[in-house]
Image (cartoon, rainbow, N blue to C red):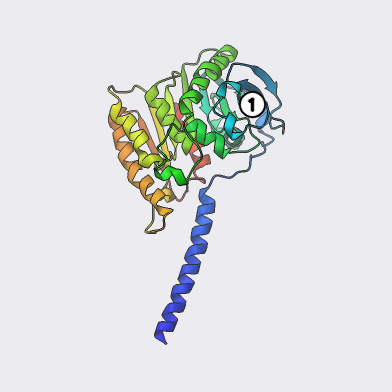
Amino acid sequence: MRVGIWSVDRIVYRILSFIILFYISMWAKPSGVIEPLNTEVAELFEIKTFCVSGNGKKKTKEFMSNSLCGEVEQLDSIKELQHRWFQIHIALPKIKSDTQSVFYTLDGNAFFPMILNLVSADIDMYDKLPLIVAIGHDSPLAFDRVLRSYDYLPSVPRDSILTQRVDETGGADQFLDFITSQVLPFIVEQYGTPKKQLLFGHSFGGVFVLNTLFNQKGGFTHYASASPSLWVDKGQLVKNNVRNSTEYLNVKLFLTYGSLERHTQKTTQANQVFQAQDLDIDEIVEMLKIQIPNGVNYQEFANQTHGSSIPYALKWSLYEFMKQD
């Protein structure tokens, strides 16, 4: 009889564990919904959206409209960046603006309305807001999985853990060239040369930010890498950049993480990703602190996951950037 009760208890435990893990995994993913703008945003910012192509063509676009800059991009054409379009969203503060500071963010379709809503809800952030520029894919999606995998990640061996997790990679270098040759000069032309500028990215975008930091292209003075996907190639992409750097970097790096991204005692295949992430984040933070003396600011958000930590990371990075000289 005791064996039967024990068996029932184990079955109930497993069912409850499955339900809990299911909801945690759903909560861990970023929302695929593009936030509508709060009514207060229009009072605080002058908003413009431009379509910018890989070969330098530009045209205006109505923000949050359903229309795309070009045709729907197919998998076989995404490598031809010169023929692709990107949506560049710009928010110029109407009061107490500091246009000598520019806050750039990747995943612009999702993060542009998110950060503007966060700012509009916090009066303490109204003082000397920077120009906010969001670089988004020409897609109706908040996060276009195929496009961001290719654009944000360098080539990764297909025998790595990445094989089962993402689509084709390898476009990070040409995407960075697009940012430095098309986006940054366009912003300078419109608003003048900034004294400081930050690049923010989350997940795959966080890996892109770290790679950009070591490439030192674009003249960014500040970098914000939120929950970088360190499980990509078991973190070797970032580690190799750190090891191969021959000089100290005079930049500021904001690195964020959700505490619930740390692995539990699960032994599932999915947990291999959490274990790799957990083992690498602490190691890489220490490596970065050596390479960037007094320039690394690490923040871990309690009880937040990979997805739920995004608004915290955006707001904290913006706030820290505003405090910097």
* Residue at the image position 33 percent from the left and 46 percent from the top: 279
In the shown orientation, is residue 23 left or right of residue 236?
right
| Residue 265 point in image, percent of width and height | 37, 59
Q: 150 left or right of 239?
A: right
Which quarter of the rendering shows the N terminus? bottom left
Which residue shows up at 40% across the image and 31% down it? 210
Extreme residue in the front direction: 76
* Mark 1 residue element: strand
Residue shown at the point (50%, 61%) measured from the top left: 20
Residue sticking out furthest to the bottom = 1
Report the side of 158 relative to 95 (left or right).
Answer: left
Q: Quadrant of residue 222?
A: top left
Q: Position of residue 152 (x, y in %)?
A: 48, 32
- Residue 235 visible in rendering: yes
In the rendered view of the protein, which quadrant contains the C terminus? top left
Residue 131: image quadrant is top right
Name the residue beneath numbered marker 1. Answer: 45
Front residue of this view, candidates 130 and 5: 5
- Residue 318 visible here: no
* Image x and y of residue 194, in percent: 50, 16
- Amino acid carrying mark 1 in the image: Phe
Return the x and y of residue 125 as percentages of the image width and height: 54, 31
Q: Is residue 249 above or below residue 305?
A: above
Image height of 82 relative to 305, above or below: above
The local crowd at label 1, few if under 14, some if 14 to 19, many if 20 or more residues have their Cα within 10 Å, is: many
Viewer-proximal residue among 301 and 76: 76
